[in-house]
Amino acid sequence: MTAKTTASGVPYDAQGDMADKDRRDAAMKGFVREFGAVAAAHLEACVRCGMCAEACHFYVATGEPAYTPINKLQPFEQAYHRHAGPFAPIYRLFGVVPSVTLEKLEEWERLIFDACTLCGRCTLACPMGIDIAELIKKARHGMFKAGLIPDRLQLMDRTARAWGSPATPADDFADIVREVGEEHGVDIKVDRERADYLVTVAPAELTEHTKALADAAKIFNKAGLDWTYHSEGFEASNIGYLNGDTELQEKMTRKIIDCAVKIGAHTLVLPECGHAYGAARWEAARWYNDKLPVRVIHMTEFLQEVVASGKIKVKPVGQTASFHDPCQLVRRGGVMNAPRDVMAALGLEMRELENNRALTWCCGGGGGVVSNTRADPIRYKAFELKKREVEAAGADRFVTACGQCRITLDLGAKHTKWDRKIENLLELVADNLAD
Ligand code: SF4
Ligand code: SF4
């Protein structure tokens, strides 16, 4: 891996030792594979109205025209018109649409990896219904094939391939969760041969936020459910989904879903992680003949179920609270009411942020951005939008339901010396279980 700079001074990373022509060709081949009927319809539909610009937190926070969503699609769109659109042969013959150069791709890397969280707010704003976030995700597939992604993401990719998780080798998983159980005095079930619920985790829960493992166990035990964590299928975060590495995405997805099927689980519970929900709930079916073999739900949906059914009871907290809606769970995933129902059960009076539910501003760290330190400066600028809204709402507590959002918000708070605790819904429920 080598950190480099383009002739115009834009930093980029490149992996592998491909010749320039091969690297460019690999990207074009990757893009062309993505130009199916839906992508083509979207790429043909843009009327250049500019309405997506004001929807993007990176553009709004910086005012830089380069960060408008439609600009982030430009090389992908150019490749489409030159190689796959209905007039491609004519465009090529008369040189109407030039080839996308390698230097352009190198400059583009920071726009689609550092300055896009795949949050989908631009998609919501587009009057033509163009799914810009999805197109950027497709463009990442071609960039991955060309070895043009941030080194930090590539490192996580390699670790996840080797270990089955970017956080820990699968061989260590059972020991880690048992230790966490002992530390918190909770009976943690792991590697059971059969269970109704397979519970999965996110990397932060295996490193700095291990209490979440104990919190989930506490709630499952209290509800009297038949459940387990499992070394063969524990990692729900999907670095392949973020990096454009579709082969790894499928492998990571199959690990958890196949494990759930193997142990006879009727439900796979995803951790408090937004993109895990996108990968396993909405994209996994394509590897199972369009029908998931097991019910897949987010931890927040599980909490709503056990609270609503009376399987667990919670003590009222009795304060005001604001909720940060994680983009992949709420805007892209449609889970809007579940967190609010659980917070209401906790007796928290909701003080909504100005942009809430589907309109939520992204935390600024989704789509792999928080793991990519090169993006820190613009991530901190985007964080200011959220900080202003939280201060304006003036609630006692600030809650979210995604570990990555929490890490991003924690980092933003630390950077700006903002004395504000960011809490996760799972932890709030576990800490307030009634007897
Ligand atoms: S998906 Fe989100 S971050 Fe990416 S361009 Fe659209 S609004 Fe901006
Ligand atoms: S809002 Fe839609 S149609 Fe308008 S510029 Fe953006 S992508 Fe194109």
Image (spheres, rainbow, N blue to C red):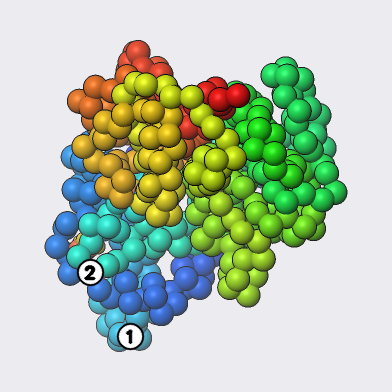
Residue positioned 27% across, 57% down in the render: 124
Measured in 3D between alpha carbons, the distance from the residue under mark 2 to the one under mark 1, in whole angstroms, is 20 Å
* Screen quadrant of the N terminus: top right
Label 2 C-beta lies within 8 Å of the nearest ligand 2 atom: yes
Residue 86: give its label.
Answer: 1
Answer left or right for 160 relative to 146. right
Q: How many marks?
A: 2
Does label 2 or label 1 sit earlier along the sequence? 1
Q: Quadrant of residue 93?
A: bottom left
Could you say whether the residue bearing mark 2 is in a helix, strand or loop? loop
Amino acid type at image mark 2: Met
Q: Quadrant of residue 348?
A: top left
Residue positioned 65% across, 52% down in the render: 268
Q: Nearer the viewer, residue 299 or 78?
A: 299
Q: Nearer the viewer, residue 318 or 229?
A: 318
Amino acid type at image mark 1: Pro
Answer left or right for 147 relative to 406. right
Residue highlighted by disc 2: 128
Q: Nearer the viewer, residue 122 or 10?
A: 122
* Screen quadrant of the C terminus: top right
As drawn, which residue projects farthest toward the left? 49
Q: Nearer the viewer, residue 330 or 91?
A: 330
Q: Image height check: is 15 above or below 380? A: below
Residue positioned 48% across, 24% down in the render: 315
Q: Image height check: is 82 above or below 401? A: below
Could you say whether the residue bearing mark 1 is in a helix, strand or loop? loop
Residue positioned 51% across, 67% down in the render: 30
Of badges 2 and 1, nearer the viewer stands 2
Q: Position of residue 21 (x, y in %)?
A: 51, 63
Whether residue 13 is visible? no
